[in-house]
Amino acid sequence: MKDFGYSINKDKQIDFDDNNKEVMNKVLRMEPSLQVCIACGSCTATCSAGQFTGFNIRRVHTFLRRGEVRFLKKEIMKCMFCGKCQLVCPRGVNLRNLILALHNSLEINGL
């Protein structure tokens, strides 16, 4: 093959049909308050773990909604369960319970 001095990158499309939505459904059954989340970012702004690590609860929420569960296990282990996120949430989402439900759901699915 001839070298033209550039390469073609792999596309960054998300194939939602291949993603695992089973985890999202289990988490919603365990913590239904997640439905009212508007992804405002208040939780991420006050997160103690986010100041010392790369933890971002909005990223967790996005991965969960998309069904991209392979990144979630490593990410949720960074949470310190301090509860600051829950105190500032304008919609009253129980975020500590969400992280626990997510952890349990990932364990049940063997991920």
Image (spheres, rainbow, N blue to C red):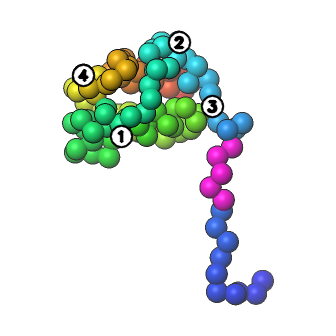
**In this orientation, does residue 107 appear?**
no
Write down the residue under mark 4: 87
Q: Which amino acid does label 1 sit on?
A: Asn
Magenta span: 11-15
Under circle 2, the secondary element is helix
- Gap between marks 3 and 2 measured at Cα: 16 Å
Q: What residue type is labelled 4?
A: Leu
The numbered mark, 3 or 2, whose residue comes first in the sequence reads: 3
Q: Which amino acid does label 2 sit on?
A: Arg
Numbered mark located on residue 20 in the image: 3
Q: Residue 6, relative to residue 51: is it above or below?
A: below
Which residue is at 32% across, 46% downward?
54
Write down the residue under mark 2: 29
Write down the residue under mark 1: 56
- Gap between marks 4 and 1 measured at Cα: 16 Å
- 81 in the magenta segment: no
Q: What residue type is labelled 3?
A: Asn
Question: Do the CB atoms of the residues marked 2 and 4 lie less than 8 Å apart?
Answer: no
Q: Position of residue 104 (x, y in %)?
A: 45, 19
Question: Do the CB atoms of the residues marked 3 and 4 lie less than 8 Å apart?
Answer: no
